[in-house]
Amino acid sequence: MPRKKILPYLEAEGTPADKTTVAWLSASRVAFTAVKPSVQWQEGEKKELNVLHRIQAHVQEVRIFDVETRKTMRHADGRLNSYEDGVVTIVLEEFLPAAYYQRGDATGAYDVRLVGPLGKEQKVRHSREDDFKPKPAACPEKAQLPGPAITRQLKREHGCLVHLERDSPQSLWIYYRADGQKADVPLRPADLNSPVWIDWLGAYLLGDFVTMSRGRMGATSQVVALMKPDGRVMTVDLSSWSLTNVRPTRAGMTAVQFMPSLDRGYDGIYLWHASGQYQIAEGYMVSDERVQVSPDGCRLAYVWEWRHERNAKRLRVLDVCVGLGLRSEENPFEW
């Protein structure tokens, strides 16, 4: 059984919105979407001639929590959509025809958003049709593959992961590198979902949840994997089910565990450390709001919820390096 070693945490001011994006801006500042005080979410939705008009800027705001000063500051009205490569995207309002939210037809659907470096964003109109257009691909063209395939995009400078659908579920993923080289990925097909680039580690996390299931890709296992851009792979056996938000940190692999059939005291964040497995945070962690690791690999930001009650969510941050007395350059995943 895992041992309890509950680490201290800091808590941001404000109630995180449902399905909020959590994004680290630096090793000490984290952004999230909060519900505006004293505003009901219904006030941000209107039906206008079969068009659903959502006004996020009326009911939500982007806040930034500085863990060094322990202050939470309002940055802008709207919903945080993403923060990538120094560019922030904040949605102010959406115009969604009935065909969009009933059938997924993006024709005529658009939103108004702020885009740009933090503090220098510009207001732009974004067509939802653009979300469905083919993006510049790092994967081989279909004609270059021997048959139908499932693909997972990596960074363009690295390449693409491919699994041929005609192969058996026991066959491997293939890493098509940007330099033209190919390599097998020694991982069950069902264990690889959406690759996530881990900046501090300089590697991809190839699977961020562990659930017991079987589908057309075969059965899952209790293993997650890390892959370097050159194709070298490290597997980590977590020896447990019902894990989401798997994340590598300077202290080891962490994951959220939710066991509805057991005592709620088992819910929380767990750490797989060299000295054993520990529960480092207690309570229900909202899986839709992704746990995010700071750029230095030391801090975890997550949304904690009290008994599933509305307006009972909080954004919390814990530091595994300080909590476990680790050096900031510690790396348990060298290979």
Image: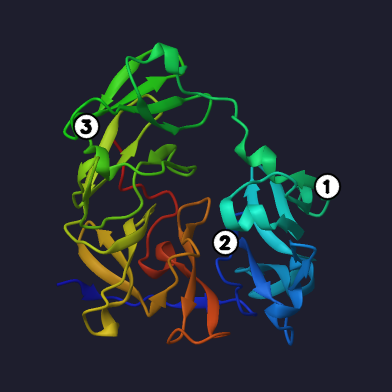
* Residue named by callout 1: 124
Check disc 3 and give the amino acid type: Pro
Residue 213: horizontal and vertical position, in percent? 21, 54
- In contact (CB < 8 Å): disc 1 and disc 3: no
Q: Mark 2 and mark 3: span between their CA atoms?
A: 31 Å
* Residue named by callout 2: 22
Picture layout, residue 75 above or below residue 161: below
Q: What residue appears at the point 63 percent right and 75 percent down from the top-left corner?
A: 70
Q: Quadrant of the C terminus?
A: top left
* Residue named by callout 3: 186
Q: Residue furthest front?
A: 49
Q: Secondary structure at mark 2?
A: loop
Residue 84 in sight? yes
Q: Mark 1 and mark 2: span between their CA atoms?
A: 22 Å
Residue 180: horizontal and vertical position, in percent? 42, 12
Task: Please tell me which residue lies in front, 126 or 5.
Answer: 126
Check disc 2 and give the amino acid type: Val
Q: Secondary structure at mark 3?
A: loop
Task: Please tell me which residue lies in front, 144 or 250.
Answer: 144
Is 179 placed left or right of 123 in the picture? Answer: left
Check disc 1 and give the amino acid type: Val
Task: Please tell me which residue lies in front, 46 or 37.
Answer: 46
